[in-house]
Image (spheres, rainbow, N blue to C red):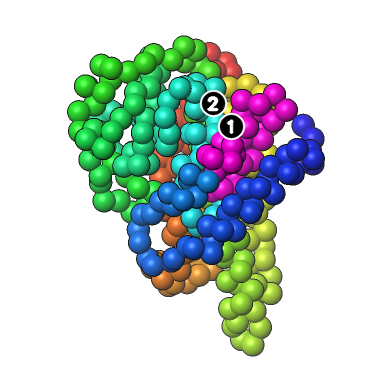
Amino acid sequence: MYLDHTDDQAALLSTVSTILSKARRRLVLDGNKASFDAELDAELESNGMLDSASYPDFGLSTAALVVHEVCRSASIAEVASSAILRPLVCPDAPRPLAVLSADPARAVRFLPIARAVLFLSEEEASWVPVSASDIETVDGYFAYPMGRLRNPEACLARANAVADLARVRGLAALAVAAEITGVLQGGLDSVCAHVTERRQFGRPLGTFQAVQHRLAAAASNIAAAKWLALKAGSGTGIDALVAKAFAQGAVDTVVYDLHQFLGAMGLTLEHPLYRWTYRAKLLKSEHGGADQSCRSLADAAWG
């Protein structure tokens, strides 16, 4: 796998960066626990930023790059499922797309703004269009808009089956892995800015060696997770499970250090760090969490 971006990838990411810069200018960090930037979401869709997985010149690795960059932002849009799953699994499904991979009655992210739901179980995959009447909004602490289906059985009864369950599960794993790398990188960016500005004992906090070592370790973990996700974009379902298991396993260590360097401020909504770490905490539990990802990986690799 080449580590340099192609000219086409660089141009695509430049467009993403321009869209995100506009989102940053209108972002209001008002301490809201959950938020969704509908304007950002719509602009990503209208500019074709969520379709790269279906283009031969781009593919899944480029889609994972787009997911990573968007999820670095404090502005929240539904990007991972729409960029990685929808083009290849359910291209006719309207978006935003929510993914329900466990108990159909559980609360899931993006459901309050979703226009379709992808059901993913051990036995089958299917998708169904939904409306506001199908959804109950749930108050949550994960920065994502959260909701549950009012009548999951009725939704499942009218769902459209999706072939190749193994393929769908691999893409879902890749989507989670790419999203985790983005939110962790965004949190790290935010903390690095803080320790550069924050002074202790007459010098910036980031000049202390102990701080530098732990931030470097966090950066190494995030970079490894990112490259595993990009490799999975051109690899197999096993590669996707490796990427997801590693990314989920890195969350606790990275998030702990990020909050440590913000002190008490990191435990409040005063600083925007929660917009990344709250998301990471929820993502680490997707599809059963890192332990289940490792068990699934072992089953896939060795039966």
Q: Amino acid at mark 2?
A: Pro
The answer to whether residue 192 shows anywhere in this view is yes
Circle 2 crowding by C-alpha within 10 Å: few under 14, some 14–19, many from 20: some
Picture coordinates of residue 134, whole percent (x, y)? 23, 33
Q: Are marks 2 and 1 in contact (CB under 8 Å)?
A: yes
Residue for point 63% across, 54% down:
18
Q: Is residue 48 magenta?
A: yes
**Could you tell whether 206 is left or right of 70 in the image?**
right
What amino acid is at disc 1?
Answer: Asp
Q: Quadrant of the rendered structure where residue 292 is?
A: top left
Tell me the residue at 36%/33% (across/down). 115
Look at the picture and state if 2 lies above or below 165.
below
Q: Is residue 297 above or below residue 149?
A: above
Give the quadrant of residue 132.
Answer: top left
Q: Please identify the dominant SS of the magenta region.
A: helix
Per the image, the residue denoted by label 2 is 87
Q: Which mark is residue 51?
A: 1
User: Which residue occupies the extreme bottom position in the image?
Assistant: 202
- The quadrant in which the N terminus is found is top right
Give the camera-side residue of 184 and 138: 138
Q: Position of residue 231 (x, y in %)?
A: 68, 31
Q: Secondary structure at mark 2?
A: helix
